[in-house]
Amino acid sequence: MRLLKQLGAVAVVAFAGQLGVALVEGNAVLTLLLGIATAVLALFAYRWVVRRTERRAPVEAEWGGAAGGVSRGVLIGAGLFAAVIVNIAFLGGYRVEGWGSVSGAVGLFGFMAAAAVTEEVIFRGVLFRIVEGWIGTWAALSLTALVFGLSHLFNENASLWGAIAVAVAGGGMLVSAYAATRTLWVPIGLHFGWNFAQAGVFGTQVSGNGESEGLLEGVTSGSTLLSGGAFGPEASLYTVVAGVLVTTVFMVLARRRGHVVSRRRRPTPAVAAR
């Protein structure tokens, strides 16, 4: 019941925000404002429901560490995607055909902020954290990363390979970022930085979600294993390799910090990010 109550509280905010963004589609400023409002309300909902259902302070979402954690995550996520897209472009799988749209990038900023926060709260803050207490860190990482990847099968240009790539690279990387820091802020920043770099800067598709109108008008072509095809660069082998490498680094940090828990041992909710 604790799992369901927490998922329900955040899902209501996420659904309302998604509906609001759909209603103002095409208005960059309103999309930005609604996206940011959805992100903030999702965090408040999470903090409230954790206090109600677990009778504790939600230290993994303490406001004090937000700015530093999110900033570090954004730098990692944006830098990592930039490295991936440069490698794809080097072999001819990506090219820039011109400038995109500033207003489009502004709207995407709000949309991606809402998506990053709500998905991290649901998948890492609720699902991984609670499941980890039942089956341990490694099993929970594998299970929740798989669920995260499969959830992308509902997207417009979804593919099984794309969902698997998201599970291996994205799911593993974001879970390991939470495990290493025991806060939601680094995973939120990493998720946002990665997604906004894809759509808002380089103008590529994100997890098969149609065309993106970012600062650049980017076009992918060639081998699906190289460029990601219609699913976008997240289905590229470069992304999978990069995600696995970053996951490994985070999990080494998690182990050194004593954050990897065994099966049926309840984990400490959070430890200050280092």
Image: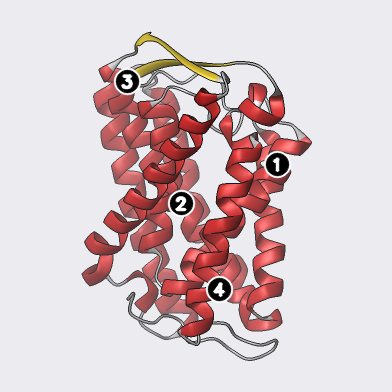
Foreground residue among 82 and 180: 82
Dot 1: what SS?
Answer: helix
Q: Earlier in the sequence, mark 2 or mark 3?
A: 2
Residue 163's disc is 1
Cα distance in 3D space between marks 3 and 4: 36 Å
Q: Amino acid at mark 4?
A: Arg
Q: Secondary structure at mark 2?
A: helix
**Could you tell me the amino acid type at mark 1?**
Ala
* Residue neighbourhood size for the residue with mark 4, other residues' Cα within 10 Å, grouped as few (<14), some (14–19), many (≥20): many
For residue 119, which numbered disc appears in the image?
none
Q: Which residue is mark 4?
A: 129
Provide the residue designation for mark 3: 215
Q: Pinpoint residue 81: horizontal percent, then vertical percent.
A: 45, 39
Mark before the other along the chain sequence, 4 or 1: 4
Q: Is residue 7 visible?
A: no
Lateral position of residue 245 relative to residue 118, left or right: right
